[in-house]
Amino acid sequence: SRDGTVRLWNLGPRGKYTFDCLKCDEGRSIRIKNKGGRRTVATCVSWRPDGCEVAVGTSCGSVQAWECVPNTGKAPNRPATAKWEHQGEVTCALYSSNGTKIASRARGDDRVLVWGRDGDLGGGLKGNLKLLHTYRGVPCENDGANLAWDPDGRHVAVGGAVSPKEEHAGTLRIYDTQRNSSDDEDIKPAAEVGLGGGEPRTYMTRILWHPRLNQIFCGLNNGDIQVFYDPKLSTNGVILCISRAIKRPDALVALLRSNPNSTAPVGPVLAPHALPMYRVERNTKRHRDENRADPVRSKKPQPPANGPMIGASSGTGTMQTVAGLNFTQFVVSNTTKNKLYAGRDPREELFKYAEGKSYVDHAYDKKVYADKTAEEEEEDMKKK
């Protein structure tokens, strides 16, 4: 990281967690220093396949190999070996699949360096790093530029950047690390392939050599991905896609496209019944349960008001909720408001509507009302 440390995290059951977050112990951090003993930035890290050593690339151009004893929980205090050979910030330091070599490259440096053990080239931890091969003519201009080893740990694949002023395309180079060579001679790659179909200023930014598929995946600066494989050595992967036959176009579509005056169908065709408003829902148990749970679609009647029961303790013999009582009081208060019927004769109220109404005259040509009210008739009866 930028603070000059490489931290070792235990992902197993012995790892420590704080608030569901993995915690790194202070004793499991490696402090990276430059040649003068000052702190420097760690730019890239890779584990040795057996997990006993870690290679670290720094911003000062050094490649450091730190020995890590497994299952001890402690980080080493100083690197087992370190080399300062690159002229810029190291972007990749990667172990081979057998753990015997380390390949590295740096930004602003057109060299790829391959390191091996001085005392034990068979993969032991003893001995300092020794520069075995130097491959020139592979410029590196990206912070994430890397390289890849083959599954056998013999060949290394790398791609060089292209300057914006140049008009040619980049290439993929594969070098044989078992070939004896000196640092002064210009080593030619064992294989070289163009990238991007020859498009100018196209170069590789990332690369991966898959160990099981035995195929090389290259990411280009224009967003494309190119895959290289050997029909005899590669298995599955893109071979499964290539083995499928190309789908032939429909005869009618081919005929329409062959005629320049015809309007051939372009793009997808949307059928009316494919729209959501015309789509018929499937009569499945899931849809039935959803419709049953929805009160609107199932037309569920409104349930009665819930609340504490009143009236039982008062001895009225009726049970009513608070919500029902409030509703009854509201209806009664609005119905009887400003209407006093005591001491009034309903027939007098009806006579008011009969005055000046033509439709009432036709309906009541014959007098059907009594001459006296009930009170007047009672008074006459008493007088008699």
Image: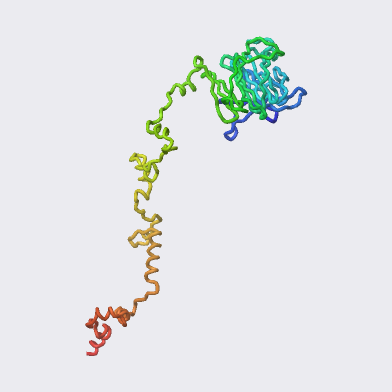
In the picture, residue 88 is in which quadrant?
Answer: top right
Q: Nearer the viewer, residue 163 or 73?
A: 163
In the rendered view, tell whether residue 26 sits above or below residue 363.
above
Report the side of 110 relative to 306 (left or right): right
- The quarter in which the C terminus is drawn is bottom left
Image color mode: rainbow
Q: Report x, y in % for residue 100.
A: 63, 14
Report the side of 39 relative to 343 (left or right): right
- The quarter in which the N terminus is drawn is top right
Residue 6 in sight: no
Report the side of 246 relative to 15 (left or right): left
Q: Nearer the viewer, residue 220 or 302?
A: 220
State how many labels appear: 0
Q: Report x, y in % for residue 23.
A: 62, 30
In the rendered view, tell whether residue 273 sits above or below residue 116.
below
Q: Nearer the viewer, residue 294 or 186?
A: 186
Q: Report x, y in % for residue 210.
A: 54, 20
Q: Report x, y in % for residue 164.
A: 66, 30
Which residue is the extreme one toward the bottom? Answer: 383
In the picture, residue 97 is in which quadrant?
Answer: top right
Q: What residue appears at the point 37 percent right and 64 percent down from the top-left corner?
A: 328
In the rendered view, tell whether residue 350 sits above or below residue 128.
below
In the picture, residue 135 is in which quadrant?
Answer: top right
Q: Nearer the viewer, residue 340 or 140?
A: 140
Residue 320 in sight: yes
